[in-house]
Structures are given as C-alpha cells and as structure tokens.
Image (spheres, helix red, strand yellow):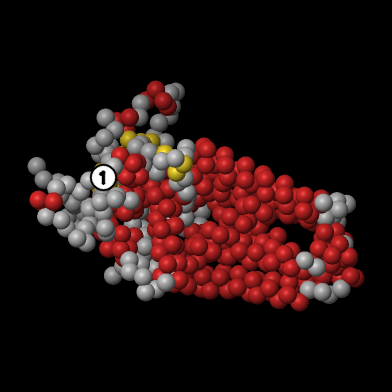
Amino acid sequence: MTVNSPPNATRTYRPVMSPTWWWLRHPAWVQFMLRELSSVFIAAFLALYLARLGAFASGPAAYAAFQAWHRTPLSIALHVLILAFALLHSTTWFLLTPKIARVHVAGRSMSEKAVAGGALTAWAIVSALVAWWLLG
Amino acid sequence: MGICGSCGMNVNGTPRLTCATFLREYAPGPIRVEPLANFPIIRDLVVDITDFMEKLPRVQPWLVRQDETPLTGGEYRQTPGEMERYHQFSLCINCMLCYAACPVYGLHPEFIGPAALALAHRYNLDSRDQGRAARQAEVYSEEGIWECTFVGQCSVVCPKKVDPAGAIQQEKVSAALDWLKSVVWPWGNR
Amino acid sequence: MAHASRSEPFWWSLFAAGGVVAAFLVPIHVLLEGIVGPLGGPTPAADYDRMHAWLASPFTRVYLFVLISLPLFHWAHRFRFTLADLGLSRFGAWLAVLCYGAAIVGTALAAWLLITAP
C-alpha cells in the first residue's frame, strides 16, 4: 500500500497562531520571551552608562546632578529591576553554554553539568575580580 | 516502541509520542489529545507532513564526497571517537515533535526546522563527509539556522535526546567561523 | 533559490560576543554602580573626582568601551528578532536598520566619549 500526500482539492485546517500573543500560551514560551526581553533592560543600563559618561564630560556639576538622580528611590528600583533581568540573562546564558560549546578533555566530552558549572564558576570569579577592582 | 516516529500528537498542549504516553501519567485528568501542532490538519488527528518530507532532502542528509575512492579501496573508516562526535545527532526518528514544539516554525513555516538542521549537523560532523560547503546554501540560508532563536523546546520534547537546538547553535558557530575565515584569508580554499 | 547568508554570521558573532560580555560583566556593574554606589559604596562612579581618577587609566577606557559596545550589539540582534516574533516580521529590513543602527550610534558615542573624556 503506498502512502500519498492528499490531493490538492483536500482542504486542510491550520489553527491560527497569534503573531503577537502566541508566547503567552506555554510557560516555557513565557520564560523564553522574558529571557529575550532581558536584553532591553541591559541596553537601558548601557544607555544610562553613556549618559553617565556624557555627564562626566559636562563637568562636576552635571555629574553631581546625575549621581543625585541615581540616589532617588525611582533609580534604585529601576536598577533592581535591571539587575534582575541582567541576572536572568547571565544564568540562562551560562546554563545554555554546554549546548553550543562541546568541550573535549582527554578525548572525552565534558558533561553538560560540568561545562555549565565551569561557566558559572568563571562568572563568579570575574564578578569578584571586577568588584575588587571597583571597590578596592 | 518509540522508534518509528509515527504517533506524534499534542497531549495537553505538549508534543508527545503517544505510544509512550500513558493515561496514568495524566490521572485524574482531564486529558486533551490534539493533532501534532504546526502542521496542516487533514482530519481528526491526521496532519499533512508534506512540508517536512520536502525539507529533509534539501539539506542533503547523506555522505557527500568530493573525491570518491573506488570500491577496491575499501570502506571509509572511522574511529569510535570520530563516530561519537556525531552519534547523538544520528538518533533522529523523524517524529516531528520538534517541529510541533518550535514556535518559530509555527510562526514562519518557511523555517527549515530542527530535525532537518540537526541531521545536516550530523553529516557535517561525520569524518567521512566532505559536504559542508554543498549544504551551506540551504543550511546557512535565512530560512535555515539563522531563523532559529534558540527557544530550545525542540530539544526538550525530543524523545531521542538528539538536541536539535544544540546542533543548530553549533552550526551557527561553524558558519560564523567560516565567515571569519573568508574575511581574514579569502584566498584559502574551503 | 536559497543561498548562504553573508550578513547573518557577522551580526550573530557580535550578538554572541556581546552576550558573553553582558553575561560576565553587566550584573556586577549594575549592582555596584547602580545600587551600591549611589547608596554610599566607594565605587569609582560615586563622584566626579573618583571617576576622573578611574578614567585616567587607558585600560579603564578600553574596558568601558567593550562593556558598552558589545552588549549593545547583543541587544540589537536579539531585539530585532524579538520584534519580528511579536508580529513585526513584515518590517524585517527596517527592524535590522533601526536596531543595528542604534547599536552603531551607541558604539560611536561610547568611543567618542571615552576618547575625549577629561
């Protein structure tokens, strides 16, 4: 018995996938969209950093005003939100690293857990180094 | 069981091989069985898989050689280590659960899709293959690997742990390195 | 007739590099310069004089350039695809121009500010 694809006259039905709201239908897709949107919050922080450099270029008075805004509850709250999304980006990025980088040690591939663990450890070390540089 | 790949359907919203899906997993219920997502529905639970069947050969999922040795030269030999490099990606049973799970394929049906791209990766990694350049036009096209946004659900639902998402990201790295090589020393042969 | 994309590998490479930089460096900078510093911590960005001393080193300037520019390209690529996945895919070319254009402008601005900073 041969299997044929349906003749052209057969109608088929395609359920509609909302181009804008499709991602709300599965928890995994919501997580995905949040992960993608984390880049917006990171970009917001970068824009603020450019503004910081601009304020610095404008002199001590401008810079003091810029820092004063950063002391407001609004700014602190915004940065907490940005930090949350930045952490989301970092954790999802490092947990996905094993998928893209197959590491071979002594002829055998490292397990996904080991690669992710290595990446997360490296992140902790780099963060500590930066903190020491900035605060020290 | 779980090897012919013919019984893929959406169970409670998730693509599953229904031969390996038991009512007791969903007790006390309810349970909702739908046709495999992202494929045109013909009737009841039957979907039209023509699109997938058309896409699979486009990535040339066979050993492509630039120089064929004659039969008297014997087999193309391969060490266990060389086989291990692509083995995982060779386990695909063409069940299309990954296509059902992929929102990109659902939104953009021109996307070549997880299974086809994972299979291309399997051959690109095969030490006996010389066909990566031949596959490029399809695999490295806009409808190929670059359409993928690494949602990752394809790998989550795959019953054989092929990890098509990983395969696609690894091909992106290869493509990026190819591009870099073509820029840094364009006179080098492929 | 399908053909291998010549531009996607380039933008994706910037996305990947920017993603790595952002993953490693952005959280600690947000914490220190966005929260700890303003609340009284001794970070370089806390006041003008500290910032001035910190920026005296060329290493700092190069570091900040990398910190700002590469993650901007990461955002640009990711946001371009996100907007397409939110229903705007028919504006594909415009999205690419807007997103990568913004990243290029931001990068140029970062370079200019860091080169000319006192």
Residue drawn at 57 percent across, 69 percent down: C99
Residue C18 point in image, percent of width and height: 58, 60
Q: Is residue C98 above or below residue B6?
A: below
Question: Which of A61/C43 is in front?
Answer: C43
Residue B8 point in image, percent of width and height: 31, 39
Determine the residue located farthest toward the right in the rendered image.
A61
Residue drawn at 60 percent across, 69 percent down: C103
Quadrant of residue B26 within the rendered picture: top left
Q: Is residue A85 above or below residue C51?
A: above
How crowded pointer 1 is (Cα within 10 Å; few <14, some 14-19, many 20+) is rated as few
Question: Which of B61/B13 is in front?
Answer: B61
According to the image, label 1 marks what residue?
A: B78
Q: Is residue C92 above or below residue B40?
A: below
Q: In the rendered image, is residue B125 in sight?
A: yes
Residue drawn at 26 percent across, 30 percent down: B1
Residue drawn at 60 percent across, 73 percent down: C104
Query: Where does the N terminus of chain A fall, quadrant-wise?
Result: top left
B32 lies left or right of C114: left
Q: In the rendered image, is residue C90 in sight?
A: no
For mark 1, name the chain. B
What residue type is disc 1 on? Answer: Gln
Q: Is residue B161 above or below residue C55?
A: above
SS assignment at label 1: loop
Residue A99 point in image, percent of width and height: 46, 46
